[in-house]
Image: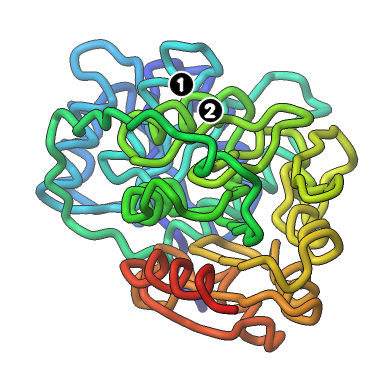
Amino acid sequence: MMNKIKVLVIDDSAVVRQALTALLESDKQIEVTSAADPFIAAQKMMKEVPDVITLDVEMPRMDGITFLRKIMSQHPIPVIIISSLTEKNTETAIHALELGAIDVLKKPTFDRNDHSDYAQSIIRVVRAASKAVVRRKQVETLRPVINKPAQNMAMIRTTEKLVAIGASTGGTEALVELLQALPVDCPGMVIVQHMPEVFTKSFAERLNRICKITVKEAAHGDSILRGHALIAPGNKHMEVKRSGARYYVEISQGEPVNRHRPSVDVLFSSVSKYAGKNAIGVIMTGMGADGSKGLLQMKEAGAFTIAQDEKSCIVFGMPKEAIRLNAVDKIVALREIAGQIQTAAHAH
């Protein structure tokens, strides 16, 4: 018999604790204990260390960020942030990802119609988190703010090459490392990172502050420009289109694909159609198979395709599936992806 996944739910709301416990324990392989605040959680963890923690960010006595910082610097455990979709909580949740949390989910609603989809979503994330590789992390309290140089017209012309990137669980910090390593004249980029709506805007703004390149949440009709990265908005699909020499994005609602909106497959499929051999595809850490079929389409259209290797992934789901489909030209560690993009961008 398989060992159960032990989850510790930390939230000061009894209603939320009960809802999350019921949702998670609908999976017979998950066993839940709960705590009203980090002090009670710490006492419980002394008796039994959980496999996964779900953590609220706004709590009395000790906030979730302080508790997360202590966990990640002392005894790293996979942590999933469960947050309300408010502007303040969104900023805090993005900071939690920087400190080492592996995913952010919105708090459950109490509309019964939403429970089935939400339950399946959180169960999938908890199962992936239980297998995630979490490393001890000492994080500086302040990240450097990059002063971007004035970009001349040569830098903002549409580049011949286009980079499409897909990531999920563990992808937020992997994208920080990748994008910070890219120079200001790198090819234009389009990125799908599975995140709830509202979070993608804060995430893009954070990346823009700490990277040399310009990063923004994509809006319908945005041009894809050299030295710029567009992040698909949460709960919207993003597709690449072409008008003459200009690449641009279309943002739409559409049905979820592979249970996701935005979907990496939707993005990659459009890139294969409109950019073909001028594209570079990158699939990074994440659970599930979203992006694998689209990456194969890109490869078949002549694009150069890259997968993050297992050792540097938090969850080796999406890259593994793409490799299985023979959709990948090069498998490299996270720290090597930026160099591979630059090499491919300059290849004729």
Q: CA distance from mark 1 to mark 2?
A: 6 Å
Could you say which is closer to the camera, residue 4 or residue 75?
75
Q: Position of residue 228 (x, y in %)?
A: 52, 41
Three-letter amino acid code at the position of disc 2: Phe
- Quarter of the image for residue 326 reads bottom right
Which residue carries the number 1 mark?
90
Quadrant location, the C terminus: bottom right
Residue depicted at x 72% and y 43%: 262
Marks 1 and 2 in Cβ contact (< 8 Å): yes
Which residue carries the number 2 mark?
199
- Quarter of the image for residue 205 reads top left
Q: Of label 1 and label 2, which has the lower sequence position? A: 1
Drawn side of residue 339 relative to residue 171, left or right: left
Task: Kindly state the secondary structure of the residue where label 1 is placed.
Answer: helix
Q: Position of residue 195 (x, y in %)?
A: 58, 39
The extreme right residue here reads: 254
Residue depicted at x 83% and y 47%: 241
